[in-house]
Image (cartoon, rainbow, N blue to C red):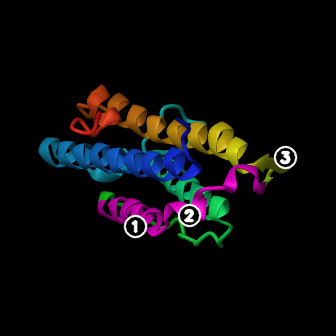
Amino acid sequence: MSISMSQASLPVLIRGLTNLQHILGKAQAHAAEKQIDPSVFIGARLYPDMLPLVRQVYIATDTAKGCAARLAGTDIPSFPDVEQTFDELHARIQKTIDYLKGFDAAQIDGSETRQIVLKMRVGPIEFTGQSYLLNFVLPNFFFHVTTAYDILRHSGVELGKLDYLGGRNEHA
């Protein structure tokens, strides 16, 4: 049995974003419970030369929406990076989830050989749809979701592996 491009992308990205929502929700509750200014978490970094939590969310959502659009051959919607609160980050993630849910399998399936060109600082990088998904999107997406988790865990938010993995009732 093979897995389709839509099966390998849309539900995986939606689940990761849903889990990111959960992680941010726990951080928001932790800030309220401990009377910590939420902006402390929003701007937190693992190391001074690394991007803060807010940018991890921007990049995870941008990666997810860019993936679906590129694989479907549609324009990528612009989400300006203006969110600075937990509520605004939740809204951005939900907007991304809703965007992904707007695609049907037929728009994504068959994109394995679609040419994808990313304009990077080092110059353009060319992929097939399959290599873009498997070798760029998924590793990059999970890097930023994991880094968001790590920033919050390092900042004292009580998170565990199941918060990251999510979907405790979806292991079928």
The first of marks 3 and 1 along the sequence is 1
Disc 3 residue type (three-letter): Val
Relative side of 113 to 164, left or right:
right
**Magenta stretch mostly in which secondary structure?**
helix
Disc 2 residue type (three-letter): Ala
Residue 129 visible within the image:
yes
Q: Which residue appears at 34% of the width and 50% of the height? A: 18
The residue that label 1 is drawn on is: 98
Q: Quadrant of residue 116?
A: bottom right
Q: Quadrant of residue 167?
A: top left
The residue that label 3 is drawn on is: 122
The answer to whether residue 80 is above or below residue 16 is below
Q: Position of residue 69 (x, y in %)?
A: 61, 64
Q: Which residue appears at 21% of the width and 38% of the height? A: 169
The residue that label 2 is drawn on is: 106
Q: Foreground mark, 3 or 1?
A: 1
Q: Give the secondary structure at mark 3.
A: loop
The Cα atoms of the two marked residues, 3 and 2, are separated by 33 Å
Q: Give the secondary structure at mark 1.
A: helix
Q: Which residue appears at 18% of the width and 47% of the height? A: 29
Residue lying farthest to the left in this orientation? 33
Residue 50 visible within the image:
no
The Cα atoms of the two marked residues, 1 and 2, are separated by 17 Å
The Cα atoms of the two marked residues, 3 and 1, are separated by 32 Å
Q: Which residue appears at 84% of the width and 46% of the height? A: 122
Q: Are marks 3 and 2 in contact (CB under 8 Å)?
A: no
